[in-house]
Image (cartoon, rainbow, N blue to C red):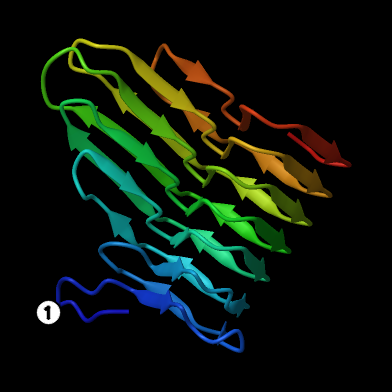
């Protein structure tokens, strides 16, 4: 975390790190880019709280809690109160809690009260807010015994179109969940809302013994 007198802390960065890298029993909070960034690495992350991080980088903002471009497994982690906000002519916000383009596995995790917003500054450009809790771009997501609750996605256009999708989970590939609760997630755009709990576009969805 960072003290109140310090600004600009950008979290924990795994950059081509050793396969034996581990992050456990830690609190990652108040970073201003990503709480955890994983680049070409596969750290062992478990029993952590990733919370109150922000990503507000302009036209494309993403992954305030965790951003990963590599296969990643999380166990017994809480990802909460992270905020992505995009602001531009045609902005896109993705993955308030987690944004991943690698295969993602979650076991006994809680993803809660994360938000993604996109606000157009002017013009007719489209506005996208995708995956308040979790945004998965191009690889499969599986979760077991997880809770995805109270996450939001809100797109606010100037004149153009809007798209708020997957306030809880937005997946562009295969999505699987077992013994998981997905509840009270909200898309907040008035129109152009899709899949407040789960949005899957481009892959299969398999849900077993889940509550939505």
Position of the C terminus, as image quadrant, is top right
In the image, residue 55 lies at what x, y percent? 29, 54
Q: Is residue 127 above or below residue 22?
A: above
Crowd class of label 1 (few under 14; some 14 to 19; many from 20; radius 10 Å): few
Q: Residue placed at 28% from the left, 41% from the top?
A: 60
Q: Is residue 42 above or below residue 98?
A: below
Q: Residue furthest right?
A: 209
In the image, residue 97 lies at what x, y percent? 47, 53
In the image, residue 134 lies at what x, y percent? 54, 47
How many numbered badges does the structure rendering display?
A: 1
Instruction: Name which quarter of the figure residue 184 lies in.
Output: top right
In the image, residue 186 lies at what x, y percent? 51, 30
Q: Residue placed at 69% from the left, 59% from the top?
A: 105
Q: Is residue 62 above or below residue 4?
A: above
Q: Nearer the viewer, residue 162 or 17?
A: 17
* Mark 1 residue element: loop
Q: Is residue 114 above or below residue 107?
A: above
Q: Is residue 199 found left or right of 146 in the rendered image?
A: left
Q: Nearer the viewer, residue 26 or 200?
A: 200
Q: Which residue is mark 1?
A: 5
Instruction: Name which quarter of the figure residue 104 lies in.
Output: bottom right
Q: Is residue 140 found left or right of 130 in the rendered image?
A: right
Q: Residue placed at 33% from the left, 74% from the top?
A: 11
Q: Is residue 180 found left or right of 88 in the rendered image?
A: right
Q: Residue placed at 57% from the left, 43% from the top?
A: 138
Q: Nearer the viewer, residue 160 or 5?
A: 160
Position of the N terminus, as image quadrant, is bottom left
């Amino acid at each position: 975390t960072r003290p109140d007198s310090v600004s600009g802390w950008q979290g924990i960065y795994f950059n081509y790190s050793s396969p034996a890298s581990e992050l456990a029993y830690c609190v990652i909070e108040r970073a201003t880019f990503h709480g955890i960034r994983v680049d070409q690495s596969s750290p062992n992350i478990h029993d952590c709280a990733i919370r109150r991080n922000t990503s507000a980088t302009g036209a494309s903002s993403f992954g305030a809690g965790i951003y990963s471009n590599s296969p990643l497994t999380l166990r017994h982690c809480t990802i909460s109160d992270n905020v992505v906000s995009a602001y531009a002519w045609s902005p896109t916000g993705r993955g308030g809690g987690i944004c991943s383009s690698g295969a993602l596995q979650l076991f006994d995790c809680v993803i809660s009260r994360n938000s993604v917003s996109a606000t157009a500054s002017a013009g007719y450009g489209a506005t996208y807010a995708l995956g308040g809790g979790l945004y998965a771009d191009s690889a499969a997501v599986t979760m077991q015994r997880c809770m995805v609750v109270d996450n939001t996605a809100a797109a606010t256009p100037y004149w153009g179109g809007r798209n708020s999708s997957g306030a809880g989970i937005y997946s562009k590939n295969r999505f699987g969940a077992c013994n998981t609760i997905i509840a009270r997630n909200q898309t907040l755009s008035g129109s152009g809302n899709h899949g407040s709990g789960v949005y899957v576009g481009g892959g299969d969805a398999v849900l077993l013994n889940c509550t939505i």
